[in-house]
Image: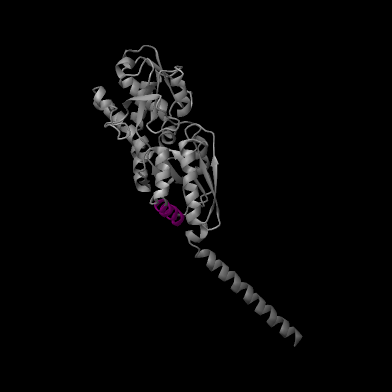
Amino acid sequence: MNSVFKSKALMIALVLILGLFLVGWKSKKTEGPKEFYKDATVIWECGPSGSTVGIVSRFFAKYFAEITGARVLVEPHREIAGLKSMNLVYNAKPDGLTLGCHIGSATVMNWLFDDPVVKYDPEKFNYIGAFPQSPMALWVKADGPYNTLEKLKKGTNLKMAGGSPIGYMSFWGTLAGHLLDLDFKTIVGVGAPPTAKLSVLREETDFTNIVSNAPGMAPELKPLASLSFERSDLNPDVPALPELVELTEKEKKMLKLTDATELGLGMFIVAPPETPQDRVEYIRKVFSQITARDDFASEVKKVLGRFDPRSAEEIQKIVHSLVENKTTFNEIRQLINKHYI
């Protein structure tokens, strides 16, 4: 009798344990992305603190945490052209808990130029969205010796303050100087926009290429030429390059890429390849919710000078078009390399 009772008790216990397991398994299996992110820890890889990408990342992370209930740890990296943070996100566990925000132009160009340090393929990322930046312009010291385009074009042995060889400051600024037929060399490695600005103000260099809203910009600098087909509404009195020089069809194609890399991509948000699609779609939905908020738009506009968020589909198309233009990028590189020192 005691043996039968024990057997029945054991059987009941096993049934209860199995039932609890099945309930937990079913609950886990049916857990949606909204439940997944609540109280989860999300790692956010991005560029240096104080940079535009670092500042926007912190803004976005704050709202992401508020909407999803996740804890977001922003991990800024001292890096060149997004290499370290892009590699980290691309090779992270594809569970949706590692995201990144990077500068679009340089990160794609690193891959286009077959940099051996690149451990990512830009066409395989899960894109969430992007924040286009303002148009680039060539800037000089407002009361300096080259404060008009005529004076700049007459200058000899000019020096342009640049950053990374394939960062937007050096790459596109050097192309603009080349198209304007300036007598100049690009000093690679001067630093980020604020450092380049100081270099020009101290007359260590004569001009630089910075987006119209770059942090550290001040009235002491003056824009002379916009690297675009049309004038920017931020600097309506500054002529666009095609107003200043007659471009060949090949040169027009080159200039058009500045729009795709800077205005189209700006800084984009990504998740690793193979991240579960329901989580990717959820993050995209959160991106839409955040970018619809007036307070977030106001904060970003102060940093970027504009607020014109792009969808994942738009970014994927732009990245694909850049990949298709790999030959043109290499032609630009050949043109500008002779100006680098």
Location of the N terminus by quadrant is: bottom right
Looking at the rendering, the stretch of residues picked out in magenta corresponds to: 277-289
Residue extending farthest to the top is 156
Q: Along the line of sight, which residue is nearer the eye, 242 or 137? A: 137
- Estimate the x, y position of residue 223 in percent, counting from the top left: 35, 25
Q: Along the line of sight, which residue is nearer the eye, 6 or 189? A: 189
**Above or below: residue 146 compared with residue 264:** above
Q: Along the line of sight, which residue is nearer the eye, 275 or 67? A: 67
Does the magenta stretch mainly form a helix, a strand or a loop?
helix
Count of numbered circles on the image:
0
Q: Is residue 323 left or right of residue 51?
A: left
- Estimate the x, y position of residue 139 in percent, counting from the top left: 37, 24
Residue drawn 48% across the image and 59% down it: 34
Task: Inspect this view and state whether residue 100 appears.
Answer: no
Task: Inspect this view and state whether residue 171 appears.
Answer: yes
- Estimate the x, y position of residue 19 in percent, counting from the top left: 59, 74
Residue drawn 65% across the image and 79% down it: 12
- Estimate the x, y position of residue 103 in percent, counting from the top left: 44, 37
Residue extending farthest to the bottom is 1
Residue drawn 44% across the image and 17% down it: 203
Q: How is the image coloured?
A: one colour
**Above or below: residue 95 compared with residue 103:** below
Q: Is residue 19 left or right of residue 66?
A: right
Location of the C terminus by quadrant is: top left
